[in-house]
Image (cartoon, helix red, strand yellow):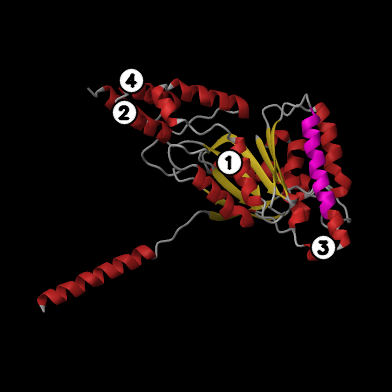
């Protein structure tokens, strides 16, 4: 009987401890609100902080920031892609802060001109200039003040959001370093952006800027969903994106680094997810460290990030944790001298890190 009572007590403790664990929250972000004087309205935005942001082992670092439109719709996809691609020693993206901007009136915030044509009427359209001013003078300063941000930032948008991204590139190229425009509505206002791009591409070089452009396979939608007018507008949508793509190819003097993908079997509604994945990979092309090669020749890592920094126009370095991991990999393979070289790089890259100095001293003492 005594043993049975003890067993019941043990079961009860296990049950309640598991219940407690099961009730722990999984949180991936926080909601915020800012009153915009530029737009005379409240603007909501959601923020995701990378896993190492509050790390207590490694030195606090500064992070690139991704600003993306239709924040509530794309928050899970973009943060999920980021979280997947940063994992492990072969991670292909740096850790970044994510800011999803919420717009109550997409036509107002995302379109650059006021028009009443097209499949729907957009009476509030044309305030994108004010919206970009809000991002530049109110939102970005707020984010930079509140969080540890680096100088590098990315702007992502889809559909109307895609033309907001293109407008930022053409009118305020200094606002962001990299731009991802997904199946943008370039048909807007009689292909306003084709005229604007043709003009800008002959005057501006867009040096050290990156653009990723994605196009969906919109004719995939069920044929019985089409009206003649709708089908005509879909064809126009595809045609204008391809014309913008052609302008990029023809602008031989352009210093803009750009990439393009046509997503066969993805329509306007589904293209965002694969395009976000491909777009972020394009921006940080060759970020992934070739661990085994670096272990044999640590200078590969320094050279790799020097080249990447020159390509994207800002200084970028591998995380302290990643270099630490590769150094430990070297030690396990009896490559002590190469581990020392890597840890010296870490001390150089992170001079205020106590951990980097301790890790180096520890390896120097190894026999």
Q: Residue at x 53, y 45 (%)?
A: 82
Give me the C-alpha separation between circle 3 and circle 1.
40 Å
Spatial separation of the CA atoms under disc 4 and disc 3: 67 Å
Disc 4 or 3, which lies upstream in sequence? 3
Q: What is the quadrant of the N terminus in the image?
A: bottom left
> Who comes first in sequence, dot 4 or dot 1?
1
For disc 2, the marked residue is 333
Residue 264 placement, left or right of 189: left
Place residue 3 in its image quadrant: bottom left
Residue 144 on image: x %, y %: 57, 40
Residue underneath mark 1: 65
Q: Is residue 20 left or right of residue 77?
A: left
Tell whether position 235 is magenta: yes
For marks 1 and 2, the one nearer the N-term is 1
Residue in the foreground of this view, choosing between 332 and 134: 332
Q: Is residue 45 visible?
A: no
User: Marks 3 and 2, Cα distance to the nearest angstrom?
Assistant: 62 Å
Identify the image quadrant of residue 179: top right
Q: Which residue is mark 3?
A: 226
């Amino acid at each position: 009987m005594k043993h049975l009572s003890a067993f019941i007590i043990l079961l009860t403790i296990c049950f309640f401890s598991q219940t407690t664990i099961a009730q722990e929250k999984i949180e991936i972000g926080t909601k915020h609100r800012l009153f915009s004087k530029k737009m005379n309205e409240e603007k909501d935005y959601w923020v995701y902080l990378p896993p190492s942001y509050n790390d207590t082992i490694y030195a606090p670092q500064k992070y690139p920031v991704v600003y993306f439109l239709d924040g509530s719709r794309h928050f899970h996809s973009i943060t999920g892609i980021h979280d997947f691609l940063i994992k492990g020693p072969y991670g292909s993206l740096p850790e970044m802060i994510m800011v999803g901007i919420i717009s109550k009136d997409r036509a107002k915030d995302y379109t650059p001109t006021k028009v009443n044509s097209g499949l729907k009427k957009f009476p509030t359209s044309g305030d994108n200039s004010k919206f970009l001013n809000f991002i530049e003078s109110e939102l970005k300063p707020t984010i930079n003040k509140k969080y540890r941000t680096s100088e590098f930032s990315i702007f992502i948008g889809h559909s109307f959001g895609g033309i907001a991204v293109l407008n930022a590139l053409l009118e305020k190229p200094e606002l962001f370093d990299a731009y991802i425009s997904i199946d943008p509505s370039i048909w807007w206002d009689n292909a306003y952006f084709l005229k604007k791009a043709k003009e800008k591409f002959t005057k501006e070089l867009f040096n050290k800027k990156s653009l990723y452009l994605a196009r969906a396979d919109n004719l995939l939608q069920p044929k019985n969903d089409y009206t003649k007018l709708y089908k005509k507008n879909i064809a126009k949508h595809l045609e204008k994106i391809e014309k913008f793509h052609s302008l990029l190819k023809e602008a031989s003097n352009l210093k803009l680094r750009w990439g393009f993908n046509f997503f066969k079997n993805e329509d306007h509604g589904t293209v965002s997810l694969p395009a976000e994945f491909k777009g972020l990979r394009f921006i940080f092309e060759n970020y992934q460290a070739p661990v085994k090669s670096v272990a044999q020749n640590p200078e590969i890592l320094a050279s790799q990030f020097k080249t990447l920094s020159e390509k994207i126009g800002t200084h970028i370095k591998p995380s302290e944790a990643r270099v630490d991991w590769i150094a430990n990999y070297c030690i396990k393979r009896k490559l002590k001298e190469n581990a020392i070289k890597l840890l010296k790089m870490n001390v150089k890259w992170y001079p205020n890190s106590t951990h980097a100095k301790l890790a180096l001293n520890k390896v120097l003492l190894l026999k």
